[in-house]
């Protein structure tokens, strides 16, 4: 019975490891950006948009974990990837000062690709 308890404990701690990995990556990214900004190597006018990257990283981590669990690209993996890419695009628009009027069609393209790939994988 002991191996069963250990495997259950190992699977229960997997979400905690994922959350700590994402949290650590976010803190490293934020610290690096603020450090570069202090040395005047980059200038971000909308630094608050960095917080949009947090759910994007969570979506990418979720897609990776789903892929590892299932061993193939499923609709859930494509959905998480699509959500992460859209959030990454929105954050890029604010952080890099892109013109939203020029970039918004990419959101439609990403959604369309996500729908096509998720239906192909079933």
Image (tube, rainbow, N blue to C red):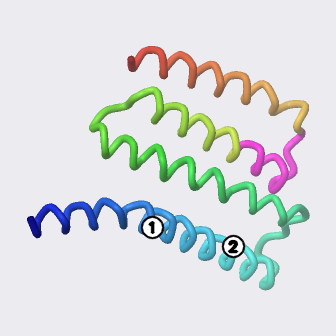
Q: In this view of the protein, which residue sits in the foreground, 15 or 67?
A: 15
Circle 1 sits on which residue?
16
Q: Quick check: 77 left or right of 72?
A: right
Foreground mark, 2 or 1?
Answer: 1
Q: Position of residue 19 (x, y in %)?
A: 51, 65
Q: In this view of the protein, which residue sits in the foreground, 87 or 8?
A: 8
Q: Which quadrant of the structure image shows residue 31?
A: bottom right
Task: Tell me what residue is drawn at x 84 percent, y 64 percent.
Answer: 48
Q: Position of residue 78 (x, y in %)?
A: 49, 31
Instruction: Please say if 104 is above or below 69.
Output: above
Circle 2 sits on which residue?
30
Q: Position of residue 82 (x, y in %)?
A: 59, 34
Dominant secondary-structure state across the stretch colored magenta: helix
Q: Is 93 contained in the magenta span?
A: yes
Instruction: Please say if 81 is above or below 49.
Output: above
Q: Which residues are magenta?
A: 89-99
Q: In this view of the protein, which residue sits in the foreground, 33 or 118?
A: 118
Secondary element at image label 1:
helix
Q: Position of residue 5 (x, y in %)?
A: 19, 66
Pointer 2 or 1: first along the chain:
1
Please identify the quadrant where the C terminus is shown: top left
Instruction: Please say if 55 is above or below 99.
Output: below
Q: Residues within 10 Å of mark 2 (few under 14, many from 20)?
A: some
Q: Which quadrant of the structure image shows residue 89?
A: top right
């Amino acid at each position: 019975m002991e191996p069963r308890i250990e495997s259950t404990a190992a699977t229960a701690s997997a979400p905690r490891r994922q959350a700590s990995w994402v949290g650590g990556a976010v803190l490293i990214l934020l610290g690096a950006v603020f450090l570069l900004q202090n040395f005047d190597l980059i200038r971000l006018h909308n630094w608050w948009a960095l917080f949009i990257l947090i759910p994007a990283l969570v979506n990418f981590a979720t897609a990776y974990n789903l892929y590892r669990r299932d061993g193939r690209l499923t609709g859930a993996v494509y959905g998480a990837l699509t959500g992460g890419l859209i959030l990454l695009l929105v954050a890029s628009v604010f952080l890099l000062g892109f013109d939203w009027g020029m970039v918004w069609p990419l959101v439609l393209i990403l959604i369309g690709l996500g729908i096509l790939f998720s239906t192909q994988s079933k």
